[in-house]
Amino acid sequence: MRLKKPTSLLAVLVATALLVTGCTGAQGDQPEAGSSAGATTSGATDKFPVTIQHALGEATIEEAPERVVTLGWAAEDAVVALGVVPVAVPAYGWGADDEGYLPWFRDTVEAMGEPLPETLKAEERSGEVNFEQILGLDPDVILAPFSGISDEDYKRLADIAPTVAYAEQPWASNWQDLTATVGKALGRSGQAAELLASTEKLFAGHAAEHPEFDGVSLAYGMGMTEGTSELTFYFPADPRVEFVEALGFTTPKSIMDFAERSTLGSSDSTSLELLGDFDDVDVFLAWAGSDNDKERTLGNPLVSIWKPVANGKDLVLTDPSLVWATSSPTALNIPWALDNLVPQLAELVAR
């Protein structure tokens, strides 16, 4: 299946960013390549300084930042969605192009007419932070609200520039909180609120177009890798589940009960012999790291007789970019994800 480029919200984001940049250009100030100076200064409407509390301390940002570095996942999407191009972003691997950019990020920056930012070496969830590279970028702020930076990392980063870490736990944030946090850091809280509202309307619009989704019980899982004898399910706190629930799907009671018994947070695995306990599932949606993992999962004798799979009500996503966009949704990639996932969900429910 050939994935579509985003329509709807992306056009609005690009138009807004171009308008802001155009206003700055009229004043004759041209930012350096890779700098977000033009967009940031014009677009910031909040009063500075601002202070953001987080799990590792607090960040006080004295004035609207012009040079933004992002770490971890997703923060770069929120920054660009608010009309600012960072000076550096993480280099992604799986799902990204050869230069480390995810498709919706590259498309938006190029549509804004801005140069793509520098990519940070050895950063994608490896736990490694290239402090020397970041120092050389001379950032005004470092945004890592969806990351796993350690306390030691944070202290070193905070010596370089005000650093915003995760609110409570490493690698735990939803797209709404991420957008609001980044908006506050950039002095664009009003724009962030508008972006949140318009993105929520996108979900509501798709849900209205597909009333057949309403009330359908959906279990969201992960494909089985080699040697695995269990099936993993995601719980309502996971962004994947939040994504489909916003379209009208419901989480089955069996999954809710499993979540209450679990001590592992947003997902847990169950023995394949116990899949019969999940017989209230109408459809099964999952992601897999490869076509082999997809075939391994659906071809397993115990999985194949489980109610939704036996009824042909299964969909396993293997396109890396779509898996990324639905696993770590952002205000920037949600339009792209909706355009590509909703038609597949409609076909799934209609089987």
Image: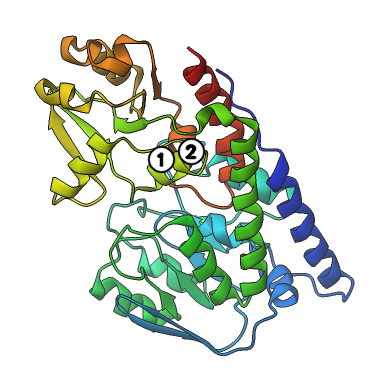
Name the disc covering residue 341, or none.
none
Comparing 225 with 190, the one in front is 190
- Residue 184, given in percent of the width and then of the height, sits at 55, 75
Q: Are marks 1 and 2 in contact (CB under 8 Å)?
A: yes
Query: Furthest residue to the right?
Result: 26
Above or below — where is 301 with respect to 262?
Answer: above
Please say whether residue 228 is visible from this viewpoint. no
Mark drawn on residue 96 = 2
Can the viewer see residue 38? yes
* Residue type (three-letter) at the residue carrying disc 2: Ala
Q: Indicate whether 85 appears above or below 303.
A: below
Q: Residue sitting at 24 percent across and 23 percent down?
A: 279
- The residue under the point 36% across, 29% down is 287
Query: Which numbered circle lies on residue 93?
Result: 1
Q: Answer left or right for 333 relative to 226.
A: right
Amino acid type shown at disc 1: Gly
- Image coordinates of residue 111 in percent, x first then y, are 74, 47
- Residue at 43 percent across and 57 percent down: it is 174
Would you say 224 lies left or right of 19 here? left
Q: Position of residue 114 (x, y in %)?
A: 71, 55
